[in-house]
Image: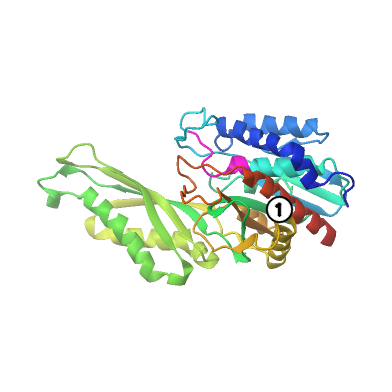
């Protein structure tokens, strides 16, 4: 199914280019739906390899087919960065104030690009679609636009990798079934007449009510939802008031609700609304709940997971595929798995022997760039196996 060039052979000459490409992306990160420079860099490199990339309808992100005919296998990378400062002291530190690739999307992008460049020199039986998706960090995720444009309609399988700093480079975390959680955004906005802090009984003590919701809502959810569903509501922002002796008229809580169980995820908006209204009613505050649907859990297809696990062993050897657990993180790869069988695995990015663990979404997050070549080998092996068995 291939002739001449192998993936390992291509990496001997191409791996350093991928590392340099990743560093360019890391130094010039772009937020979701703004990834114009990233899209142009990818498009130019793929076109230089003789391929025909197509920019997505939203103006950022692209798809690019390698090979022709059927079957079709999709490999997905996400290309957007996070709105946070890069606190590393490295030559490729972000040059964009307040924007950083702190989740490894630059690595994902370099991996899928590498697979495409290697496959461009091979004779494939069937087609591999490289999918560089925008806005994974946005709710409900850029994946929905890709689905709406029909880019998965002919696909037999889809695969992806996500950086995992808990795993050393050279290891891939695999799991059949649920891999991530559903992740939604919740805002609770309270209002009242305001007043003097010396007379809380004559008004609505809004900060007290806000604090009651902040602690009472997660507590109530823990008693009304089966604990096996793994529901977790955590506030990330609390704001109210401007003076120590004035009870404010408005206050707001914002946070994320994450849940492992898909059925409980469907019920969560109505439950949150009902509980908030019940908590604030005795105090006379007015409550407006904005519940923003995010993404469902990523649920890996068992057959696709088995194929991906075998591909890890083929590419890296026995022992490289290790069990991983379901997390409360959200991932819009889930929308693809509603359409096509597939699997996502976790790519080890921690340097071998290192005890220092910097988690995803931290301003000092970085990777052992040897993970890029590892990822290329694994996704290439998975794609070839899927083409051979479709």
- Which residue is drawn at the image coordinates 62% and 56% (left, top)? 171
Q: Which residue is mark 1?
A: 378
Q: x and y percent of residue 167 in the render?
A: 55, 55
Q: Is 100 covered by the magenta stretch?
A: yes
Is residue 202 left or right of 210 when viewed as pictured?
left
- Which residue is drawn at the image coordinates 75% and 40% (left, top)? 12
Which span of residues is magenta-colored? 99-107
Q: Quadrant of residue 110?
A: top right
- Which residue is drawn at the image coordinates 73% and 32% (left, top)? 43
Q: x and y percent of residue 362 in the render?
A: 45, 43
The kind of secondary structure the magenta stretch mainly shows is: loop
Along the viewing direction, whichever of 316 and 303 lies nearer the viewer: 316
Q: Is 311 covered by the magenta stretch?
A: no
* Residue 68 showing in the rendered view: yes
Q: Quadrant of residue 314?
A: bottom right
Q: x and y percent of residue 238 in the render?
A: 32, 46
According to the image, what is the colour scheme of the structure? rainbow
Q: Is residue 40 above or below residue 317?
A: above
Is residue 242 left or right of 386 when viewed as pictured?
left
- Which residue is drawn at the image coordinates 46% and 47% (left, top)? 358
Q: Quadrant of the C terminus?
A: bottom right
Q: Quadrant of residue 303?
A: bottom right
* Residue 57 showing in the rendered view: no
Q: x and y percent of residue 321 in the render?
A: 65, 61
Tell me the SS state at disc 1.
Answer: helix
Is residue 204 left or right of 39 when viewed as pictured?
left
Q: Residues within 10 Å of mark 1 (few under 14, many from 20)?
A: many
Q: Is residue 291 above or below residue 245?
A: below
């Amino acid at each position: 199914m291939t002739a001449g060039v192998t993936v390992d052979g291509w990496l001997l000459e191409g791996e350093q280019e991928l590392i340099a490409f990743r560093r360019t992306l890391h130094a010039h990160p772009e937020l979701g739906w703004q990834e114009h420079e990233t899209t142009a860099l990818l498009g130019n490199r793929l076109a230089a390899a003789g391929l025909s990339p197509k920019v997505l309808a939203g103006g950022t992100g692209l798809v690019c087919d390698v090979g022709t005919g059927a079957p079709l296998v999709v490999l997905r990378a996400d290309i957007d960065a996070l709105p946070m400062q890069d606190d590393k002291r490295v030559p490729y530190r972000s040059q964009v104030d307040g924007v950083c690739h702190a989740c490894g999307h630059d690595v994902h992008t370099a991996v899928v690009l590498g697979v495409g460049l290697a496959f461009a020199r091979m004779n494939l039986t069937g087609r591999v679609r490289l999918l560089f998706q925008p806005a994974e960090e946005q709710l409900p995720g850029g994946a929905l636009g890709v689905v709406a444009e029909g880019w998965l309609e002919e696909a037999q399988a889809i695969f992806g990798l996500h950086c995992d700093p808990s795993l050393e480079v050279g290891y891939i975390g695999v799991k059949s079934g649920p891999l991530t959680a559903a992740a939604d955004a919740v805002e609770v906005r309270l209002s009242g007449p305001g007043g003097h802090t010396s007379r809380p009984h004559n008004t609505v003590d809004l900060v007290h009510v806000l604090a009651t919701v902040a602690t009472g809502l997660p507590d109530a959810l823990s008693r009304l939802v089966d604990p096996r569903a793994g529901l977790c509501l955590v506030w990330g922002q609390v704001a109210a008031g401007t003076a120590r002796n004035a009870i404010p008229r408005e206050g707001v809580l914002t946070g994320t609700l994450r849940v492992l169980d898909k059925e409980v995820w469907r019920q969560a908006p109505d439950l949150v609304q009902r509980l908030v209204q019940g908590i604030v009613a005795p105090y006379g505050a007015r409550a407006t709940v904005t519940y923003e649907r995010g993404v469902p859990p990523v649920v890996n297809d068992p057959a696709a997971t088995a194929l991906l696990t075998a591909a890890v062993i083929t590419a890296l050897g026995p022992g490289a595929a290790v069990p991983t657990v379901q997390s409360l993180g959200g991932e819009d790869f889930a929308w693809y798995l509603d359409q096509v069988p597939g699997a996502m695995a976790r790519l080890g990015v921690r340097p071998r022997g290192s005890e220092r663990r910097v988690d995803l979404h931290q301003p000092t997050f970085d990777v052992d760039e040897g993970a890029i070549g590892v990822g290329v080998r694994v996704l290439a092996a998975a794609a070839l196996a899927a083409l051979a068995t479709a």
